[in-house]
Structure formats: structure tokens, C-alpha cells
Image (cartoon, rainbow, N blue to C red):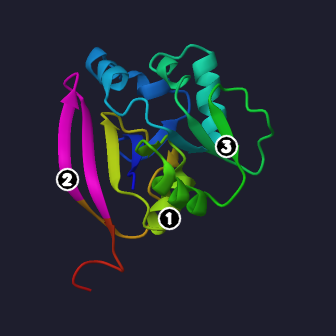
């Protein structure tokens, strides 16, 4: 059975994006971009929702730095609003229930799976017990006034066991965890 890794990039205050800020909050550096380009899982299939698909396909088409390597990767896009054919290469539109599709894909895939953005999809996969790892890139910005897409709103309580940590370019923290969904606070 393959694994599912949830990949998020966030500001220190937990936002996935911010109004008026560039991609990666303008903080990407050569070490981080090099890691993205050379990561052993860089070619693993991506799971995403319609909003992320629209955003990332536009950024890739516009030549946003760090997105060029996404074109050749297999992408599964969960949406009831997008229409076929999808224009971003190697993208498959999935209209069936995401949890059931991913459960089956974990059994059938020849490669591990990972997400790209897609906050609601990631939350659904976690609640269904399908997430094996969380990998979070924490960028050293606070976007309290302009932040959008708070990543963990609506999540259950989750214990995270750190399995890897790394710093890129002296400022970006990459944290990888094994998640355990809790029924409530420990000791309650």
C-alpha cells in the first residue's frame, strides 16, 4: 500500500496565501527551490481540488518560479465544477468521492501520493485515516492583515510526531510529521 503525504506551505500564522503577496511570499531561495527540483518524491502523483488546480495551472502557465516541474507530474483533480478536458498536462478529472478514490489509489498506485494545497481535500483525507505524513514548509512571514486560506481551520485535534526537520536558505523551516487524529485534548 502506498502512502499519502499532505504538503502545505504556510506563513508562520498558518495561512496558505496572502492578498498581494507573490508566490512563496517572495521568500523562496536557491536551497528551497533546489530541494523542490531534486526531491525524491518530486514525480509522485499529486492530489488536488479545483481551486488549487485553477491557481497552480495558471501559475505554471505564467512561468512562476518553482512551478515548471509540475507539468510532467500525474495530477488527480477532484471537482464537480471543472469541465473536461483539463488543459494542464497530465491532469485527470475525478468526479467520484475523493476519499473512496484515494483509498483505492493507495492500494493500486505504483508510487506514493501527495497533495498540493487543497485544504478541504486534505482535511477529508485526514479524517478518513488516509494521511500518513504531513510535510509543512513554514515561511518566516506573518500575514495577519492580508492572509487568506487558514490551513487548519475546521480540523480535529491532531497529535503530530516529528520525523524530520530541515532549514532552507537560513529561514524556511521544513517539518515532517506523522499525524494521529485525537478524540479530544490529551488527558481530557
Seen at 47% across and 41% down, the residue is 16
Which residue corresponds to mark 3?
50
Q: Nearer the viewer, residue 122 or 110?
A: 110
Q: Looking at the rendering, which quadrant does residue 92 occupy? A: top right
* Mark 2 vs 1: CB contact within 8 A: no
Query: What's the magenta region?
Result: 161-179
Name the element at disc 2. strand
Please determine whether, in this image, residue 70 is positioned above or below residue 149.
above
Q: Position of residue 124 (x, y in %)?
A: 53, 62
Q: Position of residue 171 (x, y in %)?
A: 23, 28
Please determine whether, in this image, residue 73 is positioned above or below residue 16.
above
Which residue corresponds to mark 1?
154
* Mark 3 vs 2: CB contact within 8 A: no
Task: Please rate how many residues cluster around mark 2, counting C-alpha atoms within 10 Å: few if below 14, some from 14 to 19, many from 20.
Answer: some
Q: Going from the N terminus, do you reach mark 3 or mark 2 first?
A: 3
Secondary structure mostly taken by the magenta-highlighted segment of the chain: strand
Q: Using the rendered image of the protein, determine whether residue 146 is visible from the camera's viewpoint.
A: no
Q: CA–CA distance between discs 3 and 2? A: 30 Å
Amino acid at each position: 500500500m502506498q502512502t499519502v503525504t499532505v504538503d502545505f506551505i504556510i506563513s508562520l500564522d498558518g495561512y496558505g496565501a496572502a492578498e498581494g503577496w507573490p508566490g512563496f511570499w517572495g521568500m523562496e531561495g536557491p536551497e528551497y527551490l533546489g530541494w523542490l527540483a531534486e526531491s525524491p518524491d518530486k514525480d509522485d502523483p499529486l492530489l488536488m481540488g479545483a481551486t488549487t488546480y485553477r491557481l497552480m495551472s495558471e501559475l505554471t502557465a505564467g512561468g512562476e518560479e518553482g512551478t515548471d516541474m509540475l507539468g510532467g507530474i500525474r495530477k488527480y483533480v477532484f471537482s464537480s465544477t471543472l469541465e473536461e478536458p483539463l488543459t494542464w498536462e497530465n491532469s485527470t478529472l475525478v468526479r467520484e468521492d475523493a476519499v473512496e478514490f484515494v483509498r483505492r489509489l493507495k492500494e493500486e498506485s505504483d508510487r506514493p501520493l501527495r497533495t498540493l494545497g487543497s485544504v478541504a481535500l486534505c482535511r477529508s483525507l485526514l479524517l478518513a485515516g488516509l494521511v500518513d505524513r504531513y510535510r509543512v514548509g513554514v515561511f518566516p512571514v506573518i500575514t495577519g492583515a492580508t492572509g487568506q486560506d487558514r490551513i487548519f481551520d475546521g480540523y480535529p485535534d491532531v497529535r503530530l510526531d516529528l520525523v524530520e526537520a530541515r532549514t532552507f536558505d537560513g529561514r524556511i523551516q521544513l517539518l515532517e510529521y506523522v499525524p494521529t487524529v485525537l478524540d479530544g485534548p490529551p488527558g481530557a
